[in-house]
């Protein structure tokens, strides 16, 4: 798809090669293009741009809609754009020669995808990316955005802050994977993703992906992940109901995590 004025785009079924903008015009009537200026105004990375710079970005922004389990881009595919997830979930993953999938990150709304790749001399995606659920994204052409960055120090610092935050998170994750047991990683995942109930004592986690995907993200075998959940359930620390996991007592679960940490 040729870059031009912002319009809504969609990929329906199959592999859409969105990273290279080979997508078909959207058949839905929702005027997403009209929402793009508001989205750019409200997002921290774009809000510091001048009106003229924001207009430049707006002209090369595409709205992308993907169905569940649809490819966003492939490993080593040329990276011509970065993405901002508006709705849904995206998994970044590797595939081993034996065909085993390793999820390295799950993107949630508000986060960017392939932002760092934009600065490489020969930008190619280092991972695969695909949706876990139906998802909406903004795609921003790299070439134009790099030109804007050269003229906007404020935006440069925002991008650097985003990249630094992500790097820090990855260092913390490497530390956790190398020092924490599988039960502790699971419990901390539940605690960090829970939403407190009205009593502020209990909480609930809505699994935003298949258990196999979450297990891969935590570097745990799916069977081990299921056994850990069963053990936590037998201890009355959680109650599993499909994709919902209820935490009756957050303090008790946090105490269990602390015991796991010191008894590792």
Image (cartoon, rainbow, N blue to C red):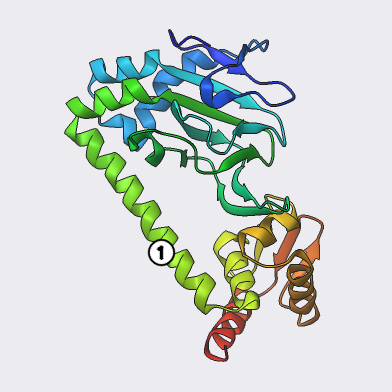
- Please say if 40 is above or below 133: above
Q: Residues within 10 Å of mark 1 (few under 14, many from 20)?
A: few
The one nearer the camera, 256 or 252, is 256
Residue at the spot 65% in from the left edge and 33% down from the top edge:
71
Residue 264: x %, y % from top left: 57, 88
Is 101 placed left or right of 113 in the picture? Answer: right
Q: Quadrant of residue 68?
A: top right
Residue 199: x percent and y percent? 61, 66
Residue at 62% of width from left, 72% of height from top? 187
Instruction: Using the image as rendered, state which of residue 49 and residue 77 is in the foreground.
Output: 77
User: As rendered, which of 53 and 237 lies closer to the eye?
Assistant: 53
In this view, the residue farthest toward the bottom is 263
x, y (%) of residue 34?
A: 48, 13
User: Taking 29 as reference, is 93 above or below it?
Assistant: below
Task: Please give left or right for residue 86 compared with residue 52 in the image.
Answer: right
Q: Which image quadrant for residue 74?
A: top right
Q: Which residue is denoted by mark 1 in the rendering? A: 171
Label 1 sits on a secondary structure element that is helix
Residue plotted at (73% across, 53% down)? 98
């Amino acid at each position: 798809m040729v870059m031009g004025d912002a319009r809504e785009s969609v990929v329906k079924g199959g592999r859409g090669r969105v990273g290279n903008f080979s997508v078909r015009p959207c058949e839905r009537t929702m005027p997403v293009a009209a929402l793009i200026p508001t989205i750019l105004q409200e997002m921290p990375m774009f809000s510091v741009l001048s009106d003229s710079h924001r207009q430049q970005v707006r002209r090369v922004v595409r709205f992308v809609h993907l169905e569940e389990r649809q490819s966003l881009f492939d490993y080593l595919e040329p990276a011509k754009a970065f993405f901002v997830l508006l709705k849904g979930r995206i998994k970044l993953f590797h595939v081993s020669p034996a065909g085993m999938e390793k999820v390295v990150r799950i993107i949630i709304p508000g986060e960017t995808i392939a932002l760092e790749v934009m600065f490489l001399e020969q930008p190619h995606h280092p991972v695969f990316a695909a949706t876990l659920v139906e998802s909406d994204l903004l795609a921003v052409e790299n070439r134009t955005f790099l030109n804007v960055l050269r003229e906007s120090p404020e935006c440069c610092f925002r991008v650097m802050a985003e990249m630094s935050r992500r790097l820090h998170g990855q260092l913390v994750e490497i530390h956790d994977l190398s020092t924490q047991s599988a039960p502790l990683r699971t419990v901390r995942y539940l605690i960090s993703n829970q939403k407190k109930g009205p009593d502020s004592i209990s909480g609930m986690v809505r699994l935003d992906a298949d258990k196999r995907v979450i297990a891969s993200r935590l570097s745990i075998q799916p069977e081990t992940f299921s056994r850990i959940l069963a053990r936590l359930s037998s201890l009355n620390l959680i109650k599993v109901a499909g994709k919902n996991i209820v935490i009756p007592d957050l303090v008790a679960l946090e105490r269990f995590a602390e015991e796991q940490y010191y008894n590792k």
